Image (cartoon, helix red, strand yellow):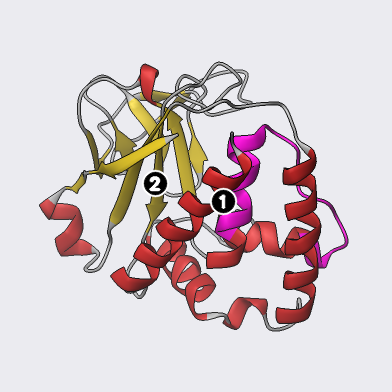
Amino acid sequence: MEFSPFEVVVDPELSSRFPGIEVLGVLLRGLRVREWSEEVEEAKKAIYEYVRKKYSLETLKDVHAFRAYRDFFWRIGIDPTKMRPSSEALVRRILLGKELPRINTLVDAYNIASIESEITMAAFDASKITGKISVNYSSPDEEFLGIGMDHPLTLSGGEVVIRDESRILSIYPYRDSEHSKVSLDTVDSVLLVCGVPGIPRSKLEEALEIAVRYVQRLVK
């Protein structure tokens, strides 16, 4: 597997409204994504123990990174008690005694990295991406079919989204598209760490390093 930096441009208007919003990316090449592996399952067991030692349900909302995502959600009109930031939701799931979902080795690997780093992540099949990736606002009546949805959403306009040059890839930072999702056929992938105001760039850089290490170790 090879990896290299991948630039994601944040729209200046968005940066002005949400100072500190930033997305860092890496292009992963030569992946062999599998349905599951013993190594991934062992890594999950280790992260369960890590989470149970470090966090509690009572104090989870006060963790700095989770609080930053919650505050951002409120600002974009999403109730984070109903739609939780994904990194927090994964930690909460473990604290409730549930296992992490088994998707495939790449998604499972970056979910583990998201838990360890407290940072929300996303990954897309690079073969489904057209041109450059940017973060900006949706336009009225744009459609978006998220993973697991039966019917596309018609957006009202003004939603924060990740997009390539032909379509929306994600409603930022909580729902990815069906079109560009990682699958067992994925060979190259763009992996993103999703920042919001209040989370320093250094923490995003650390999260990206953690994610790459897990992918190198678990996606062979």
10 up-or-down from 207: above or below: above
63 up-or-down from 88: above or below: below
Viewport quadrant of the C terminus: top right
- Rendering quarter of residue 88: bottom right
Residue 129 falls left or right of residue 86? left
Secondary structure, mark 1, is helix
Question: Which disc, if any, is residue 214?
Answer: 1
Measure the C-alpha gap from mark 1 to mark 2. 14 Å
Question: Which disc, if any, is residue 113?
Answer: none
- Image location of residue 89, percent across then percent down: 66, 58
Contact flag, marks 1 and 2 (Cβ < 8 Å) = no
* 101 in magenta: yes
Viewport quadrant of the N terminus: top left
- Image location of residue 74, percent across then percent down: 45, 64
Amino acid type, mark 2: Leu
> Crowdedness of circle 2 by 10 Å Cα count: few (<14), some, many (20+)?
many
Q: Which residue is mark 2?
A: 192
Report the front residue among 154 and 45. Answer: 45
- Which residue is located at x 57 percent, y 80 percent? 63
Image: magenta residue range = 94-114
Residue 182 falls left or right of residue 81? left
Report the front residue among 94 and 3. Answer: 3
- Which residue is located at x 51 percent, y 53 percent? 213
- Which residue is located at x 36 percent, y 40 percent? 3
